[in-house]
Amino acid sequence: MPSAGEFGFLAATLGELLAALPVTLGLFLASIALGGVLAAGLTWVRLRGAPWIARLVRAYVFVFRGSPLLIQMFLVFYGLAQFPAVRHGMLWPVLRNPFACAVIALALCTAAYTAEIFRGALLAVPVQQIEAGRACGMSGWLLLRRIIAPLALRQALPAYSTEIVLMVKSTSLASLVTVWEVTGVALRIISTTYKTLEVFMCAAAIYLLLNFAILRLIAVLEYRLSPQLRAAAPAARRAGAAAP
Amino acid sequence: MNIVSARNIHKRFGQQEVLKGVSVAANRGDVISILGSSGSGKSTFLRCINLLETPDAGEITVAGERIVLGAGRAARSTRLRRQIDRMRGELAMVFQSFNLWSHLTILENLIEGPVHVQKRARAECIAEAEALLEKVGIADKRDHYPAHLSGGQQQRAAIARALAMRPQALLFDEPTSALDPELVGDVLRVMRALAEEGRTMLVVTHEMSFARSVSNRVMFLHRGQVEAEGPPDELFRDPPTERFRQFISGHR
């Protein structure tokens, strides 16, 4: 039975760890956003670009999926700084910042995985439905926006939700390049209190809750996006309401 | 004046020459049935008319706008692409497997092209779409998704979607081939009503009774060429070639 003092410690620890949650969220959101944009570009090039540049994208995907994220992060943060050109270059204000380096490494890595998810989703869009779009005069951006992307998104969501959850957990690696996010703060508390079990349990609980919330959000999105997979809606429910 | 014409269309897939110079010209109100055994090139020909397949050579005219295809014509030029998009809007297509957009309701399927391609007012498109659904007999399916409809209902929705584009002519690519026999009748009834309204239609089909009683012209393709052509009465009463005679006797 833990004593009152122990409860006090747990509460204080949770408070300290939660104070670092914005940093974890920042790492996550920035890298998912950047990685998503990069992945969209990579997918486009892989499917539509010239053969040599498509091969380059394949090599990129292979390297970033095939090597440990931690090493990628070390290379960005410690490795690049070895080059005088980088230290004196325009990007140094960014590359000397641990948070920025962690975001870059996370984004580069998730882009490789996400590009593969996007590619699979695009290839799974039924050709007939694309053809129906062309047959009524759609092409290019309009066809992508109205037909291909909405269908691909529904295909991609289950796999992409896994990638998102993995990214939340991967932000903990940033603690090793001196970013004070949840795991980093946990390590710091442990180094002074030696209460490894309690502190790590609190940290794990925070990640668990965060991922639970994210997965619920995605589940709601998935449900909203797939009315065509459910039993026929009673006509009365939506009758009269104009199409969205 | 012809509403749609395709002249001397050639198409090859690799070594195989699928179309060896096929032509067709439809005036307003013409219903032309295109017959042929599988592999005769009839579906490819229809798809060449709205350029879902790019012919290797030939000339296509739709509502006075002409596209010439042949060696050296870059199909990727923006100007040509715009022209093709515009032309496709005038030629609505009905597919063998319906090809309704699965993420949109039936009503949304109908207004998609009018609203986003033709930029017409949404309210007007909805009113028109509802009238079209009424006409093909599935007004109650307005807010259902394609997956919730039977094949025959889906094909009627697809016909309504084609009509919603206010096209100059309708192209049908074996519209009843994917349907259960008892559902074919509903779709054919709708098509017959359209023909009676004076719509211009090009129909690739295996339905001999439709070709015979609804269309005013029949084309028979064999190995990428027109083997027989003419009004159905004459053609069916007195088959001009032995192959056509065999073909119709095999489809009775």
Image (cartoon, rainbow, N blue to C red):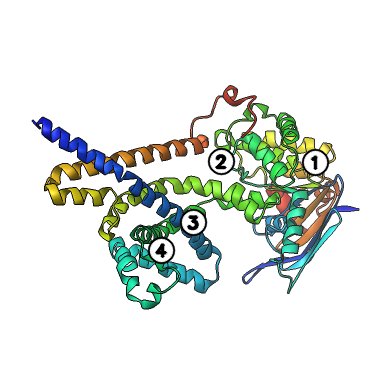
Q: If you read the primary sequence from the N terminus, does the residue marked by circle 2 or circle 1 appear first?
A: 2
Three-letter amino acid code of the residue under disc 4: Val
Residue A235, given in percent of the width and then of the height, sits at 59, 25
> Are callouts 1 and 4 both on one chain?
no
The front one of A127 and A179 is A179
Q: Is residue B19 visible?
A: yes
Q: Within 10 Å of the Cα at label 4, are there few (<14), some (14-19), or many (20+) other Cα atoms?
A: few
Residue labelled with disc 4: A94
- Give me the disc on residue A37: 3
Residue A190 versus residue A91 in the image, above or below: above
The chain to which mark 4 is attached is A
Residue at 41% in and 70% down:
A59
Q: Mark 2 is on which residue type?
A: His
Query: The residue under label 1 is which amino acid type?
Result: Val
Residue ID for mark 1: B214
Q: Nearer the viewer, mark 3 or mark 1?
A: 3
Work out whether A236 lies above or below B81: above
Which subunit holds the residue at mark 2?
A: B
Distance from Cα at disc 3 to Cα at disc 1: 54 Å
Q: Which residue is mark 2?
A: B103
**Distance from the alpha carbon under mark 2 to that under mark 1:** 35 Å
Are the residues under marks 2 and 3 on the same chain? no
Of circles 3 and 4, which is in front? 4
Give how far apart the Cα atoms at labels 2 and 4 are: 43 Å
Left or right position of A34 against A68: right
- Judge depth for marks 2 and 1 and give the one in front: 2
